[in-house]
Image (tube, grey):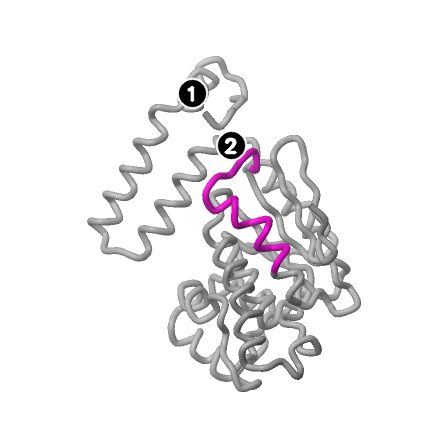
Amino acid sequence: MTHPTLQVEKSADGLLHITLHRPDTRNALNTQMGIELREIFAPLAFHPQDVRCVLITGSGDKAFCAGGDLKERNGMTDEQWRVQHAIFEEAYYAIMNCTAPVIAAVNGAAFGGGCELALACDFIYAANTARFALPETTLGILPGCGGTQNLPRAVGERRAKELILTGRAFTAQEGYEWGMVNRVFEPAALMPAALETARALCASAPVSLRQAKTAIRRGLDVDLRTGLAIEIEAYNRTVVTEDRLEGVRAFGEKRKPVFKGK
């Protein structure tokens, strides 16, 4: 599979490293990029294969993703716009449903669909030079790839309303203080830190990570009692795994466990 708008690397330990690569457009999201993201993530929503962690970043040091490619969209009919947006929806929803952990390493501007892409990931590491915005309402539309749902869950309802309704940009540090960004780094330290975390996740028990992620995600949508039931169901799925036995055995033998995802 070729990826004209992405650089994709897969390492032996299960790390899938994806770089948005349209540097001439500040890595803007066009139809082709949506198709490629959908092709990669749609299967991972149902079966992780041998992928243990996904890391997404942008090409260059100016932009993570500048949002939708408005030059491509200019002149589209309503139907063409809807068809394109359906591709974006399928891609972003697949990222949100990916069974493996997904890290966004935001190296620059993340506006519009770029901000939504970061929000679709499980957590966000950002350079201190990165800026975020959801400016869609200033263009006559609104965030349509999870922004109106994921941002309030990250920063709270009132702040999300302010950011979405005004379209105001905000810094990585502000995102950190509000709970959207997990950690902020000097630009040169961003990728080493993101890779360090990604490698640690790749070395962890894949079934445990998948089940923990599922319990958190599903639990947020229900009441506490139902959430506890979801948690114990996820827990019980780890009890019968070889990795659970390996983890206990390695602890007793004072060595690092070797997890196989079984």
Q: Which residue is mark 2?
A: 204
Tell me residue 25's x, y (percent): 75, 70
Dot 1 falls on a residue whose secondary structure is: helix
Residue beneath the point at 48% across and 39% down: 47
Tell me residue 120's x, y (percent): 51, 58
Q: Which residue is mark 1?
A: 242
Q: Mark 1: which amino acid?
A: Glu
Q: Residues within 10 Å of mark 2 (few under 14, many from 20)?
A: many
Residue pushed farthest right?
24
Is 39 contained in the magenta span? yes
Q: Residues within 10 Å of mark 1 (few under 14, many from 20)?
A: some
Q: Quadrant of the C terminus?
A: top left
| Disc nearer the start of the sequence (1/2) | 2
Q: Mark 2: which amino acid?
A: Ser
Magenta span: 35-51
Tell me residue 168's x, y (percent): 56, 80
